[in-house]
Image: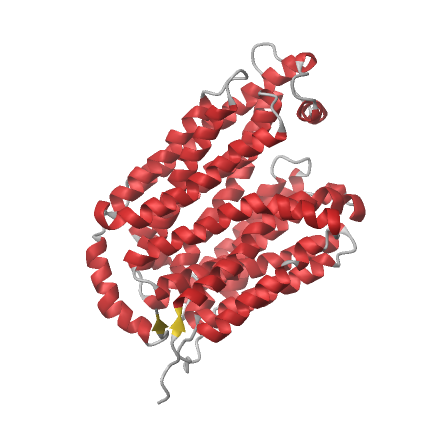
Amino acid sequence: MPQLKQTVRPLVIAAIMASMAMVAIEATIVSTAMPQIATQLGGLNLYSWVFSSFLLTQTALTVVFGKLADLYGRKPAILAGIAIFLFGSILAGFAWSMPAMIVFRLVQGVGAGAILPVALTVVGDLYPARERGKVQGYLASVWAVSAVLGPMVGGLLIRHLSWAWIFWINVPIGVLAAILFVLFLHEEKRHERPAIDLAGALLFTAAVASLMMALTDAGSANSTRAGVEIAICIVAGVLFVMQEKRAADPMISFGLWAHRPIAAGNAATLLAGMALMGLTTFLPMYVQGVMHRSPVEAGLTLTMMMLGWPSGATFTSRTFSRIGLRRLLIGGTVFIPLGAIPFVLLTPQASPVWAGVGSAVMGFGMGILSVSCLILIQEIVKVSERGSATASNLFARNLGNTLGAAVFGAVQNYGLTHASGGLPAVSADQLKRLLSAVPGHFESNAEIRLALHHALHLTFTSMFVIALGAVISMLFMPAVEIGRVRQTVETVGANEASKHIGIDA
């Protein structure tokens, strides 16, 4: 029997960071270019769907590709994801209309739905728990750097080339990542012919996609369409449950998802994802519209979260073996509502520094939660289920983001249309004029500004309550001795993993 080639971990991690950077930078770089894209392509009424379509397929396919990685191996799954993502990126650069752009963004989202869960699963395969936290910190820094560089790179590409290059720039990065995976990630060939639960995958995708479309349409004028989408979600969900109960190898193992540590961790991740969306969506609006500060100051307050996140991830990697994962999870999650308190107490006269501090604290808590939760989930399952378990956690975070956008958007709209204390209801046009006013010239908008303050105060209070829910969810996490888990993984589990992946440090 030929000897399995050795996996070179540093170069595989470089490939993972490159592939994740493509997905991470996509959100901020596309946001920078979208005004020019919408001007050229038209279809301004479809503006939000350029972002929603990407998130829709990414969320729906995350779980599917996590399962495929368990069935067929990590390497084929992530290479397929990179190929699909690059194909969508090339087509998006050639988009001739806004509907075409949305379709190509759907394709990109499919690729992203494969890249992220499989990349994190590969990290779980290659590194024992005591080393994995440090690697997760490196990966968290990719998101922080991408958040800062995205707008800058997008602006430079638009100025000197064209908006198409914000998509085409992915091609050399993706090709490099694919080459590194091909050359330096080696798995044992799988001779068994796994049974694919195709019906389960299609029904799950339909249920999640229709749910996300309904959440996107919630609160819009087209309530009928949202109702139809909810009905499709319910029907597809019922059929999916029936299919999974009779499938020989179901797409989703209900026993795995209901396992208490996984259920508690994913519930906390979902609620934390909701709170995070409330912060990223409405903090810039408060700083600009209520405090009447510049967009740069608004961006800086939000950037503090991206500094806190890798800090929390790094702290986790260095302390979880001493503190214990359960205590770290509960204590780390407490930072999320703690960081939300400054937003509940914000006033129009407050300093943006106060908002920046709260943003950094929330980011620190998110860094601890995301890394420690992922380590725990990957450690308590078999290697053959690690892809599915990892994907379940990412799915919970993405779904939380979508739910947060819908819930907090509804809360804000309620606050704007039901202003208290005799304040006027605020229309969309009035809000637009307020946000575009020159800083320092808001006297004529004083009532609207105050009404927006009350609406966003209600939103931030809701965010705080949901963040508390994440802490309560984490209290249901049972005690898990990471030392005992590590011993199991490094003896039994590592032997199982070594059958599939050769490792060269």
**From the viewer's perspective, is residue 386 above or below residue 471?**
below
Who is closer to the viewer here, 290 or 175?
A: 175
Q: Which quadrant of the rendered structure holds the C terminus?
A: bottom left
Who is closer to the viewer here, 249 or 21?
A: 21
Residue 167 placement (x, y as % from top left): 67, 56
Residue reaching furthest to the bottom: 1
Residue at (33, 44) in percent of width and height: 315
Residue 424 visible in the picture:
no
Horizontal arrangement in the rendering, residue 404 relative to residue 164 (left or right): left
Q: Which quadrant of the rendered structure holds the N terminus?
A: bottom left
Residue at (48, 41) in percent of width and height: 306
Q: Which corner quadrant of the image does residue 426 belong to? A: top right
Residue at (42, 39) in percent of width and height: 308
Who is closer to the viewer here, 312 or 456?
A: 312
Residue 119 visible in the picture:
yes
Residue 353 placement (x, y as % from top left): 48, 25
Colour scheme shown: secondary structure
Residue 356 placement (x, y as % from top left): 48, 30
**From the viewer's perspective, is residue 263 above or below residue 355?**
below
Residue 415 placement (x, y as % from top left): 57, 23
Who is closer to the viewer here, 115 or 420?
A: 115
Horizontal arrangement in the rendering, residue 343 relative to residue 286 (left or right): left
Total numbered labels placed on residues in the image:
0
Residue at (71, 61) in percent of width and height: 91
Residue reaching furthest to the top: 422
Q: Which corner quadrant of the image does residue 312 belong to? A: top left
